[in-house]
Image (cartoon, grey):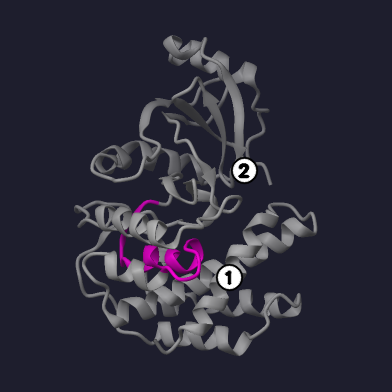
């Protein structure tokens, strides 16, 4: 799945730092994580380097983070990886790369939130602060920021594949949630800033509650329902109502219906990634399965609420 032909090593990164950011070149350096788009290397105690490796789109996403995230990082109640330096393509490495602050914590797919009240309040405060009106020229989310009904083909294919693999217990209930969401009135308010990819591997926890949010490569402006979907996937049982009461402005019924639809899509994706991990297929992560299955259970239980 790698799109970068150059092997990314500690030696390569040190050479790039010496060429473009010499003051950082002698810091301790170690591989931190292999993400969907980027490798993340820890640089000293307080910095990280994001190196594009697995997708061609990673270059655009890194530049988007570098441009827009500094405008948002101040005022957020959770730490985020604030961009510090941009590495430009060179003869040694033909792609951009990014130096950010390091955000401590454990990804929620490996260490889920376990304190409902604290987790609900923390997630609501973060999304309330993030979901401010976006300016003209803010990035567009493509299909993810458009009409939920436009995802019908992807939803149908994802559900059919999950049924074929025996991964879904109540496919008709899952379909009912998505169809109800797709029929909900669309967002009529201003476009707001959205993280756009709040799956459990992009949200960090410490001591049972959320402590950081990472990977803003999908940052865009649009319908807040896209981010509110994360509540079904990230929160432990017993936290949803607390989250909806704490988030401001209080989401109306149509927004919650749309959020359930986006949550179904996210959960189906997580189920497939988890199943691929269990069976050793490329791109698979077994830790994605449990939160995705839990999300579908919550979603089908709350269809008519």
- Of residues 13 and 94, the one drawn nearer to the viewer in this rendering: 13
* Residue beneath the point at 58% across and 54% down: 109
231 drawn magenta: yes
184 drawn magenta: no
Residue denoted by label 1: 294
Residue 88 is at least partly visible in this image? no
Q: Is residue 189 left or right of residue 279?
A: left
Q: Secondary structure at mark 2?
A: loop
* Residue beneath the point at 66% across and 60% down: 273
Task: Indicate the position of residue 69 as horizontal and vertical percent values.
Answer: 32, 41
Q: Is residue 39 above or below residue 55?
A: above
Q: Residues within 10 Å of mark 2 (few under 14, many from 20)?
A: some
Give the residues drawn in magenta, as a range: 219-239
Task: Indicate the position of residue 268 as horizontal and vertical percent values.
Answer: 59, 70
Residue 24 is at least partly visible in this image? yes
Task: Indicate the position of residue 31 as horizontal and vertical percent values.
Answer: 62, 29
Q: Of the residues tagged 1 and 2, which is closer to the observer? A: 1
- Name the disc covering residue 54, or none: 2
Q: Is residue 278 above or below residue 22?
A: below
């Amino acid at each position: 799945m790698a799109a970068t032909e150059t092997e990314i090593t500690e030696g390569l990164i040190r050479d790039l730092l010496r060429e473009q950011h010499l003051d950082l070149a002698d810091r301790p350096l170690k591989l931190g994580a292999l993400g969907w788009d980027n490798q993340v290397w820890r640089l000293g105690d307080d910095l990280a380097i994001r190196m594009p490796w697995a997708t061609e789109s990673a270059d655009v996403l890194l530049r988007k983070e570098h441009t827009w995230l500094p405008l948002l990082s101040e005022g957020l109640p959770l730490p985020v990886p604030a961009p510090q330096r941009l590495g430009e393509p060179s003869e040694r490495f033909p792609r951009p790369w990014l130096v950010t602050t390091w955000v401590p914590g454990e990804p929620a797919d490996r260490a889920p939130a376990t304190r409902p009240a604290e987790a609900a309040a923390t997630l609501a405060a973060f999304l309330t602060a993030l979901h401010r009106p976006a300016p003209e020229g803010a990035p567009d989310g493509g299909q993810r920021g458009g009409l939920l009904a436009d995802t019908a083909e992807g939803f149908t294919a994802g559900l059919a594949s999950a049924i074929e693999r025996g991964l879904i217990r109540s496919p008709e209930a899952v379909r009912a949630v998505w169809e109800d969401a797709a029929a909900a009135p669309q967002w009529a308010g201003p476009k707001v800033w959205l993280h756009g990819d709040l799956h459990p591997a992009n949200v960090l926890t410490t001591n049972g509650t959320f402590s950081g949010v990472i990977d803003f490569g999908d940052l865009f402006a649009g319908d807040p329902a896209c981010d509110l979907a994360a509540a079904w996937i990230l929160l432990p049982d017993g936290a949803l109502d607390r989250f909806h009461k704490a988030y401001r402005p209080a989401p109306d019924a149509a927004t919650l219906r749309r959020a359930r639809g986006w949550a179904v899509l996210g959960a189906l994706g997580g189920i497939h990634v988890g199943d691929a991990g269990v069976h050793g297929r490329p791109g698979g992560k077994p830790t994605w399965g449990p939160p995705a299955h839990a999300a579908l259970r919550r979603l089908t239980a709350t269809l008519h609420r």
